[in-house]
Image (spheres, grey):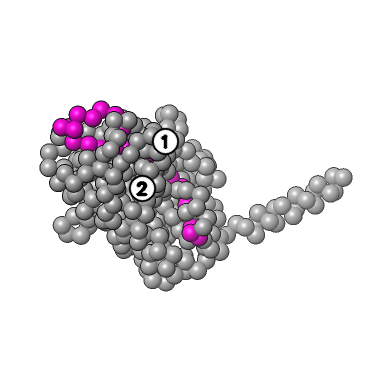
Amino acid sequence: MLKKYMAAGVVAAALVGAAGTAHAGKDLDTVKARGNLICGVSTGVAGFAAADSQGKWSGIDVDVCRAVSAAIFGDADKVKFVPTTAQQRFTALQSGEVDLLVRTTTWTLTRDTALGFDFTGVNYYDGQGFMVNKKLGVKSAKELNGATVCVQPGTTTELNLADYFRANKMTFKPVVIEKVEEVRAAFFAGRCDVFTTDASGLYATRAANAPNPDDYIILPEIISKEPLGPVVRHGDNQFADIVRWTLFAQIEAEEYGITSKNVDEMLKSDNPTIKRILGVTPGMGKALGVDEKWVYNIIKQVGNYGEMFERNVGMGSPLKIARGQNALWTQGGLQYAPPIR
């Protein structure tokens, strides 16, 4: 019996050894051969993905793309950003126009299966809300019976809106416009009573686009779950793993107090977990098929999850959104990463 268990142990060890190095797939090979990552983002949502007058992109979605680039190339700037509308985004990913989609996209069953995609994590936990002009005198979404509502087509927002009004036995008149900038313009011009999208998008719109932000309120109701995250095509497990573990690495780094400011000092840490994360103890990079300094490069060039959140959408940004559900699990939030080991 002992010999049997010993034999099983040898087989298990051999399997671990065989799986010790990741094997590149076609999408990752294409990215490496091209020398940059092509990332699909939104056409402009403050805090998530927006280009300035010089064409420089910033936002929490943009930073996820930059972090993946740092993991693959050791350089966060080897990214080309392709703006996509809500309706175009999935075709862009399916056709190979973009390698990775990080565009305030909600993880749902049908998107994860029927469209041929893999969601690799959640970089922002959100929920759908409603914004109205204060002069409407509305304090609750339950008071919106008969309202005209501006909404984008091809979104979970459009479906949730219909479900919510039906469930509450209310009627509404949709004003459906594809481009987000045109939806905002229609709402602020008074073409509709209500603008509905993810709550983060409402805060971004009010802060960055409202003629007078104080004239608008975001109603208290959150009517849906909107876990937003990076998306890749089915078929290249290693590329999906790199995207997945890039986000996990940023969360793990925050949990262990590793920041862009102290990461060089942290290389000297005696903590075995920190040594593994930063590649001082080798093995994790080899398993993923990237450089052992992959996490160091991500944190040094982009930052941990908390840094990424704070500067783009948190208290260090014009949006000033509280961490809430996006706090670490140790702080009462939902951000929780499997261990890097």
Q: Residues within 10 Å of mark 1 (few under 14, many from 20)?
A: few
Q: For the residue labelled by badge 2, is the local secondary structure a helix, a strand or a loop?
A: helix
Q: Which residues are the magenta region? A: 115-141
Does the stretch in magenta take in 152? no
> Disc 1 marks which residue?
167
Compare residues 183 and 11 and report the one nearer the observer: 183
| Residue 268 horizontal/vertical position (percent) | 42, 42
Distance, label 1 to label 2, CA atoms, is: 14 Å
Q: Residue furthest right?
A: 1
In the displayed structure image, the side of residue 150 where residue 38 appears, left or right: right
Q: Residue furthest left?
A: 211
> Disc 2 marks which residue?
158
Q: Residues within 10 Å of mark 2 (few under 14, many from 20)?
A: some
Q: Residue at x 37, y 38 (%)?
A: 165
Amino acid type at circle 2 is Glu
Q: Nearer the viewer, mark 1 or mark 2?
A: 1
Q: Residue at x 31, y 44 (%)?
A: 197
Amino acid type at circle 1 is Ala
Picture quadrant of residue 161:
top left
| Residue 57 horizontal/vertical position (percent) | 25, 55
Compare residues 45 and 26 and report the one nearer the observer: 45
| Residue 288 horizontal/vertical position (percent) | 52, 56
Marks 1 and 2 close (CB-CB < 8 Å): no
Q: Residue at x 12, y 42 (%)?
A: 211
| Mark positioned earlier in the residue sequence (1 or 2) | 2
Q: For the residue labelled by badge 1, is the local secondary structure a helix, a strand or a loop?
A: helix
Does the stretch in magenta take in 120? yes
Q: Residue at x 44, y 64 (%)?
A: 94
